[in-house]
Image (spheres, rainbow, N blue to C red):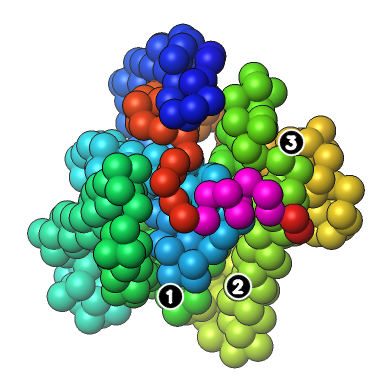
């Protein structure tokens, strides 16, 4: 890979996009084979992989809007990386099609005979029904597409002429967009994940999934930036100061995720209502108990103790290991949310879990790399670009 250091455009994109596409194709073929081997396992594995990558893209959209709303300076040099992640979201909607076909395997409430004999499901039926479920899916991705499209459009227009009007447009989109994003990501979490066990409910669940997704995105972003710098791409623009800031933001959202997770658990434990405790009780049987403890240690305790230090956030070798670990733990987190609905007796890892996340991930990375290399890697006429390059943490 090579870059023109005057325009910040890639002059040699390398073969990484094609490699990602090939890996993705292999994963999708393997997933298709898995469908014929065990269709129910396939649907649960697919849902896990789908939500994993959608939360990465959604994290990019959140990061972009947050950048514009607060008028951040340090994040200007990495803004295009977040915009590229948000740009993939409309394409991820295609991967929801298997979920629709597998609704009867995934969601108990989708069976009319089950609803007929369950008073609680009858009460929830106006919301939990297949037509409205699909309509909400269209609304979620419609909102994300609109926000991503407008923010990417105005960002590229800024490369031509950096006017105050364009900066105001991006902020104007981001303000109501953040509210719309909060509502859509919350209800998407309710629909796709919480309704796997329709008798259970938690008002914190949407924030829990959102916070985990932001940690996953920041890990993905940091890994990609570190990799680009290793190839001498933007090594004179993105410095240790930016690594430090990315590390600090990741550290903050690790704490936020842990706070949401603990708050959800504490309130349910204290109230001791059977309809609420059943969800955590299921994750405390068999090998799920070990995975629950592993999630606490791996997604909070260990990263907290390491990233709290200044060295870990400024040393690329340390930071690379930590964000790669957190990226992996985000998958474990979603696996822990989804799979007990299928394997109630204990965790049973299937090769289809890896096939689905690799298959969808390969296509995601292909789209991400294609978008990123088709535009300047930094917003070249952003008024705060020079300040961002010389940022000191």
Q: Residue 61 sits in which quadrant?
A: bottom left
Q: CA distance from mark 3 to mark 1?
A: 36 Å
Q: Is residue 97 visible?
A: yes
Residue linked to disc 1: 201
Q: Which residues are magenta?
A: 384-391
Outermost residue, bottom direction? 271
Horizontally, residue 369 falls left or right of residue 5, namely: left
Horizontally, residue 64 falls left or right of residue 236, namely: left
Closer to the camera in the image, 385 or 350: 385
The label on residue 260 is 2
Front disc: 3 or 1 = 3
Name the residue at 18% across, 60% down. 139
The label on residue 80 is none
Horizontally, residue 331 falls left or right of residue 62, namely: right
Name the residue at 14% across, 64% down. 132
Q: Main secondary structure of the magenta part?
A: helix
Q: Residues within 10 Å of mark 2 (few under 14, many from 20)?
A: many
Q: Residue 182 sits in which quadrant?
A: bottom left
Residue linked to disc 3: 320
């Amino acid at each position: 890979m090579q870059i023109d250091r005057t325009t910040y455009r890639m002059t040699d994109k390398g073969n990484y996009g094609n490699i990602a596409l090939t890996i993705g194709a292999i994963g999708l073929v393997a997933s298709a084979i898995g469908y014929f081997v065990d269709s129910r396992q396939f649907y649960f594995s697919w849902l896990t992989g789908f939500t994993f990558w959608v939360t990465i893209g959604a994290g990019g959209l959140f990061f972009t809007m947050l950048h514009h709303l607060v008028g951040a300076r340090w994040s200007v040099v990495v803004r295009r990386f977040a915009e590229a992640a948000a740009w993939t979201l409309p394409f991820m909607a295609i991967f929801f099609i298997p979920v629709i076909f597998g609704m009867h395997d995934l969601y108990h409430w989708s069976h009319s005979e089950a609803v007929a004999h369950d008073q609680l499901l009858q009460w929830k039926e106006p919301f939990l029904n297949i037509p409205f479920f699909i309509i909400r899916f269209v609304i979620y991705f419609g909102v994300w597409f609109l926000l991503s499209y407008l923010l990417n459009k105005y960002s590229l227009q800024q490369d031509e002429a950096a006017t105050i009007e364009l900066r105001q447009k991006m902020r104007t989109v981001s303000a109501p967009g953040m509210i719309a994003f909060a509502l859509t990501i919350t209800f998407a979490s309710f629909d796709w994940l919480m309704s796997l066990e329709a008798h259970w409910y938690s008002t914190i669940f949407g924030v829990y999934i959102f916070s985990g997704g932001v940690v996953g995105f920041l890990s993905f972003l940091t890994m990609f930036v570190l990799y680009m710098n290793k190839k001498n791409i933007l090594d004179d623009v993105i410095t240790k100061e930016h690594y430090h800031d990315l590390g600090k933001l990741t550290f903050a959202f690790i704490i936020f995720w842990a706070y949401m997770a603990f708050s959800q658990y504490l309130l349910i434990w204290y109230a001791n209502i059977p309809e609420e405790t059943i969800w955590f009780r299921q994750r405390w049987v068999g090998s799920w108990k070990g995975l629950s403890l592993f999630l606490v240690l791996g997604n909070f305790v260990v990263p907290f103790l390491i990233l709290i230090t200044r060295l870990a956030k400024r040393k690329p070798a340390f930071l690379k290991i930590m964000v790669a670990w957190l990226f992996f733990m985000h998958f474990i987190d979603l696996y822990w949310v989804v799979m007990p609905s299928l394997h109630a007796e204990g965790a049973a890892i299937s090769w289809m879990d890896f096939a689905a996340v690799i298959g969808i991930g390969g296509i995601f990375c292909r789209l991400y790399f294609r978008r990123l290399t088709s535009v300047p890697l930094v917003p070249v006429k952003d008024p705060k670009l020079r300040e961002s390059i010389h940022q000191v943490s």
